[in-house]
Image (cartoon, rainbow, N blue to C red):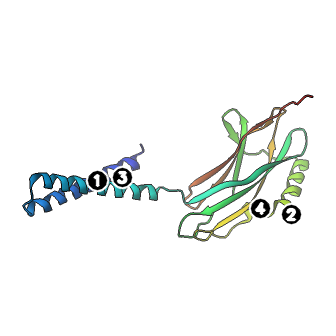
């Protein structure tokens, strides 16, 4: 458990214990039976602990809900590159407007290693621009610069070149960040190339 989580746990236990002692004191001052005093104290402790637990989980809830909408589309460019196009939806789960940073993208270049694209050839860069600017993949998610309204949502396309080998397409990660910046990831699973024979 991280330091912040430990401190919150100790604080919550201290508050619950204090509440229980306060309840016991009130019952004692009312000259109640010992069993009633202990029962009231224990009940108050349990109630406060439950409330703090629910409140803590609500505070840790992600501010944004980010997910792929529909299936990813792979467009061939040449023997080395394919272009990935995927529509991504972003929903604001809070009561305040949220601005997102430009979308980041990476894919698996070797087992467990993810990297961004290296500089592209003019041919590949031109193919990416042509597909990204087509009406089929409009609007791009990165063009959204306004804040997402409270409890509102947006959607847009992410179009990226991916270097692929003969084995298939690698695992890809689309990264959306808010202004904190908390990070939200959408994973596009790897797909193995198959040979089908009749």
Q: Position of residue 83 (x, y in %)?
A: 83, 48
Identity of the residue drawn at 30% across and 57% down: 48
In this view, 92 is above or below 176:
below
Q: What is the quadrant of the N terminus in the image?
A: top left
Label placed on residue 8:
3
Q: Quadrant of residue 113?
A: top right
Label 2 vs 4, first from the N-terminus: 2
Q: Is residue 32 left or right of residue 116?
A: left
Give residue 142's position: percent from left, percent from top: 73, 61
Give the distance between the C-alpha atoms of the residues marked 3 and 2, in whole angstroms. Answer: 50 Å
Instruction: Determine contact: label 3, label 2, CB under 8 Å.
Output: no
Q: Position of residue 8 (x, y in %)?
A: 36, 52
Residue 46 is tagged as 1
Q: What residue did someone put label 4 on?
A: 140
At mark 2, the secondary structure is helix
Please tell me which residue lies in front, 185 or 129: 185
Secondary structure at badge 1 equals helix
3D distance between C-alphas at marks 1 and 3:
17 Å
Identify the residue shown where x is 77% and y is 49%.
72
Mark 4 or mark 1, whichever is nearer to me: 1
Q: Secondary structure at mark 3?
A: helix
Which comes before the other along the chain, label 3 or label 2?
Answer: 3
Q: Which one is in front in this view, the residue at disc 1 or the one at disc 3?
A: 1
Of the image marks 1 and 3, the number of the one nearer the N terminus: 3
Question: In which quarter of the view is residue 115 placed?
Answer: top right
190 or 20, nearer to the observer? 20
Specify the quadrant that holds the C terminus: top right
Label 3 or label 2, whichever lies nearer to me, is: 2
Give whichever of discs 3 and 4 has the lower sequence position.
3
Q: Residue furthest top?
A: 197
């Amino acid at each position: 458990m991280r330091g912040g989580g430990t401190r919150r746990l100790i604080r919550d236990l201290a508050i619950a214990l204090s509440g229980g002692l306060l309840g016991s004191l009130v019952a004692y001052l009312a000259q109640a039976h010992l069993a009633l005093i202990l029962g009231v104290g224990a009940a108050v402790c349990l109630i406060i602990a439950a409330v703090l637990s629910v409140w803590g989980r609500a505070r840790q809830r992600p501010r944004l809900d980010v997910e792929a909408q529909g299936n990813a589309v792979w467009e061939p460019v040449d023997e080395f590159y394919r272009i990935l196009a995927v529509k991504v939806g972003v929903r604001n789960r809070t009561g305040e407007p949220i601005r997102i940073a430009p979308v980041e993208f990476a894919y698996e270049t070797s087992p467990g290693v993810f990297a961004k694209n290296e500089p592209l050839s003019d041919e590949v860069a031109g193919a990416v621009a042509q597909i990204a600017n087509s009406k089929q993949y409009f609007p791009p998610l990165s063009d959204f610069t306004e804040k997402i309204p409270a409890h509102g949502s947006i959607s847009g396309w992410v179009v990226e070149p991916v270097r692929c080998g003969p084995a298939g397409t690698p695992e890809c990660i689309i990264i959306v960040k808010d202004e904190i910046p908390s990070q939200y990831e959408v994973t596009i699973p790897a797909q193995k190339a198959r040979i089908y024979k009749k």
